[in-house]
Amino acid sequence: MIDIDAVYSKGGLTDPDLMIDVALVGKDGKGASGVQFYGDADILQDRPVLMDIVLPVGTWQLAARPKRGWPTRADNKWQLRFTILLAGAFILFPTALAGRLSAARRSVIQTLKRRERELEALSRRLEMAVETSKIGIWEIEGSSDVAIWDRRMRELYGDPVGSSDVPLSVWRSFLHPNDRDRVINGFQEALRHVRNHSIDFRVRLENGTHKNIRAMGCSFRDSRGRNRMIGVEWDVTRDVDLNNELKRTNQQLTHRNAQLTYAKQAAEKADQAKTEFLANMSHEIRTPMNGIIGMSDILAESPLSVEQEQCVDTIRDSSVALLKIINDILDLSRLEARQDGDQRR
């Protein structure tokens, strides 16, 4: 866009003392083939001095002649032509300058529009990310007792005041008594020393709901030298509950493992005692059984009646059978002891 009246004025075309008549041809930048848009049409028919004015988009053609037409005899024609050329130059310079400024302005406008589109797209992406993550955003100033909360922050705390300006005293009233001093001192220290801060704490809302909150803040000094902090908060109650449940389960498993270990040790001791008992008993029983069998053999060699021989044979057969059972029990006990030893290794 060009302020054409300003161009005419700066170029001197509207000066009443101008010594030449001027016409401009080339509307819409079409040059000599365009439409005349300034000056008297008779100027173009009176052998004018012509000059092209180059614009960023096309050209104009400048036509000039002496005031009230050409004289019949001009003694100063070279001086007059120089004056016309000089006047044309005065018109050409501001016109060309205005064209360059217009082109630069269009370029700047296009750049600004592109940056605006990029910022708009980035803003939409950030808004979608915040909306999806359910993270609340807040801002505080070191000397102020009021915090600025966005919609998510107000939803997180049940919108206690119904506006984005929330007194810090209201926020403090939600803090769990056991966490209040730790949380307040932590934020004040971070704000005072201009450093980042992260903390977990518990809150109790007006409706009795308990929540676990995780907060992160970034401190900085603004252009006026004031300490400010921008941060985020989100609800981590479910994460804390899952973590506590995991700890309880882990403790139960640890206790159960201890019980199983104790039971295993008790079983091993009982099994070892059983094995030792069987081994000892088998040995203690086998010794007198060998004596009974030996005495039966000796008694069988003595002169006996038929009935006595039958009794001795019965004693000897029973003793041999009983000794075999005792040997089998002893062998089984040794096998179990060996297997238990292999498993413990």
Image (tube, helix red, strand yellow):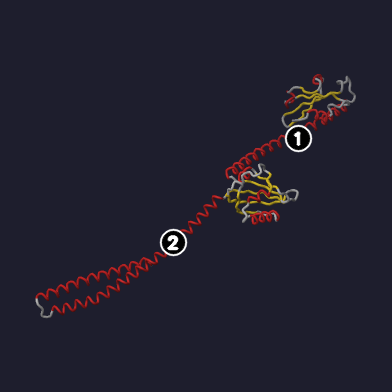
Residue 271, position as x, y percentages in the image: 34, 68
Residue at position x 46%, y 61% in the image: 255
Contact? badges 2 and 1 (CB < 8 Å): no
Reading the image, the residue beneath label 1 is 101
Height in image: 99 above or below 281?
above
* Residue nearest the observer in this picture, 79 or 215: 215
Residue 294, position as x, y percentages in the image: 19, 78
* Residue nearest the observer in this picture, 268 or 32: 268
Height in image: 117 above or below 287?
above
Report the amino acid beneath label 2: Asn
* Residue nearest the observer in this picture, 67 or 74: 67
Residue at position x 37%, y 69% in the image: 269
Residue 283, position as x, y percentages in the image: 27, 75
Reading the image, the residue beneath label 2 is 257
Instruction: Report the Cα–Cα distance between label 2 and label 1.
Output: 84 Å
Q: Earlier in the sequence, mark 2 or mark 1?
A: 1
Of the two numbered discs 2 and 1 in the rendering, the one whose residue sits closer to the viewer: 2
Q: Is residue 12 left or right of residue 196?
A: right
* Farthest right residue in view: 75
Report the amino acid beneath label 1: Leu
